[in-house]
Amino acid sequence: MQELWRVKDHCADLMTSYIAYPYLRSNLITLSNFTDIHSNTITGGFTTSFGEGHLNVSFSKVELLANKEKLFADNLKHTPFKDSSAKPTLLEKGMQRIAIAYILTQTARSQNDLGIKISHYCTVFESLFSSDNIELTHKLSERIACFLEDNFDARKKIFKQVKEIYSIRSKVVHGSTINVSADKLKNISKQTDDLVRRVTNKIQDSADLDKFFRKMNSTEADNKEFEEYMLDLVLGKPNCA
């Protein structure tokens, strides 16, 4: 269900649990042992990019078949949730960039407050494209634009979008109010959700990018190699992306 987000924006989430408990029903003439079974839906409360938690979204058979491989891939290769119960946090040194991004994406998707949702999505961008905090907004805007697009006009559009997205994030993390209209905020949230989806899909679908986004150990040499790749990408080295 969570992987369907890779196809398009939605808020569906279902994880059913059951509880069984035996007891005696005293209203029966002959006391007998019974076991009652009750079910309850445990949900993470995912919301759409507009912050809506109750919205009908349809997935066509064509969409599902076209994305069959990515939807049923072995996610443990980049998301070690199987170890989560034994650790106080999964966000530790040595985690793959794409694994951290996946965790933070689920956190963003569970928010119905659009300002907080956007700020969490920005952290996804940072987990993937940054290795320091120097001129962070400018560097991320450049890197995301160049990572997703080859055309100059398309890159310029994404550059401006990320700048605007980060203006919202800055307000949120510094405890300020967001002075934009509800419609404007929804539009920015939608753009952010779309960009995160495009970025993570490209990484997950390209084995050539594993050496930058799926390395299990982050060393100084790894960071230098990553920074060199980002520099080549921004400066337009042929066949870099």
Image (cartoon, helix red, strand yellow):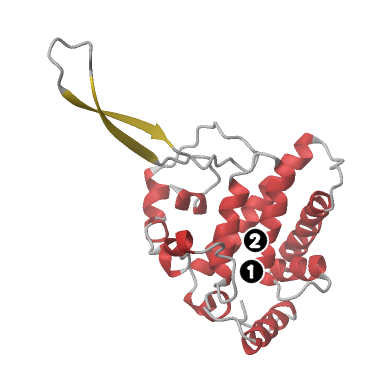
Q: Amino acid at mark 1?
A: Leu
Return the residue nearer the eye: 74 or 239: 74
Q: Position of residue 202 (x, y in %)?
A: 55, 66
**The label number, if any, that marks residue 5 in the structure image:** none
Q: Position of residue 156 (x, y in %)?
A: 78, 63
Can you name the residue that lies furthest to the left here?
Answer: 30
Q: Which residue is mark 1?
A: 128
- State the separation of the CA atoms marked 2 and 1: 6 Å
**The label number, if any, that marks residue 124 in the structure image:** 2
Can you name the residue that lies furthest to the bottom here?
Answer: 221
Tell me: residue 85, above or below residue 150: above
Q: Is residue 71 left or right of residue 163?
A: left
Q: Position of residue 12 (x, y in %)?
A: 48, 40
Q: Secondary structure at mark 1?
A: helix
Q: Are marks 2 and 1 in contact (CB under 8 Å)?
A: yes
Return the residue nearer the eye: 8 or 174: 174
Tell me: residue 197, above or below residue 116: below
Q: Secondary structure at mark 2?
A: helix
Tell me: residue 186, above or below residue 143: above
